[in-house]
Image (cartoon, grey):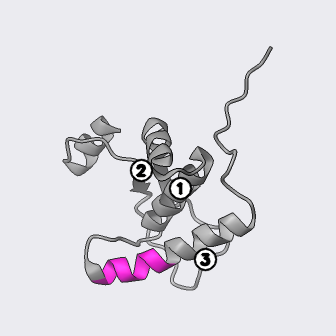
């Protein structure tokens, strides 16, 4: 992740999530799942995800879901650098995370399985 962050963003440090938009503009008439355009890629650092989950006292799968929601919002054109942008992005991120929590998504997602 540090190399990706350095190569693509010019920041020589690790990060938890990076988004790489496809480059095509999003359709202005709304977003439909069926026939939806490819948005791009989201890269998540699982070691960083696990560290952050431990620091926050949450399940690593819950943190992974938080990072994925954050990354997808970036693919959809949201940002959080400027205060006005942050005011648009943060409430959406919270709403989607809450919806995922209500659906029981996240916890256990990174549960390690061992085979005999």
Q: Quadrant for the C terminus, please.
A: top right
Q: Earlier in the sequence, mark 2 or mark 3?
A: 2
Marks 1/2: CA–CA distance = 8 Å
From this view, report whether residue 96 is shown above or below residue 2: below
Q: Position of residue 2 (x, y in %)?
A: 29, 38
Residue 36: x and y in percent read 63, 67
| Residue at point 30%, 84% (across, down) | 84
Q: Position of residue 43 (x, y in %)?
A: 46, 46
Under circle 3, the secondary element is loop
Could you say which disc has been placed on residue 101 in the image?
A: none
Q: Which residue is mark 3?
A: 31
Please say if the residues under marks 1 and 3 sit with CB atoms less than 8 Å apart.
no
Where does the image place residue 113, in percent across and percent down from the top left?
Answer: 72, 28
Residue contact at pointers 1 and 2, CB within 8 angstroms: yes
Magenta span: predominant SS is helix
For this rendering, which residue is in front, 56 or 31? 56
Residue at 44% from the left image edge and 41% from the top image edge: 51
Mark 1 or mark 3: name the one nearer the start of the chain. Answer: 3
Residue 81 lies in quadrant: bottom left
- The circle on residue 68 is 1
- Which element carries disc 2, helix, strand or loop? strand
Q: Tell me where the magenta segment starts and ends, as one range.
A: 84-91
Front: mark 1 or 3? 1
Q: Which mark is residue 17?
A: 2
Nearer to us of marks 2 and 3 is 2
Q: Is residue 99 above or below residue 105?
A: below
Q: In whole angstroms, how far apart are the C-alphas of marks 1 and 3?
A: 18 Å
Residue 8 falls left or right of residue 104: left
Whether residue 34 appears in this view of the structure is no
The answer to which quarter of the image holds residue 30 is bottom right
């Amino acid at each position: 992740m540090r190399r990706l962050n350095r190569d693509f963003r010019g920041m020589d440090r690790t990060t938890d999530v990076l988004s790489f938009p496809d480059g095509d503009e999003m359709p202005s008439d709304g977003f439909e799942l069926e026939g939806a355009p490819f948005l791009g890629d989201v890269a998540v650092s699982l070691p960083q995800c696990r560290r952050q989950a431990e620091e926050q006292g949450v399940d690593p799968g819950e943190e992974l879901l938080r990072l994925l929601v954050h990354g997808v919002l970036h693919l959809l054109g949201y940002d959080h650098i400027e205060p006005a942008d942050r005011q648009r992005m943060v409430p959406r991120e919270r709403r989607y995370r809450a919806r995922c929590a209500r659906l029981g998504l996240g916890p256990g997602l990174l549960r390690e399985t061992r085979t005999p």
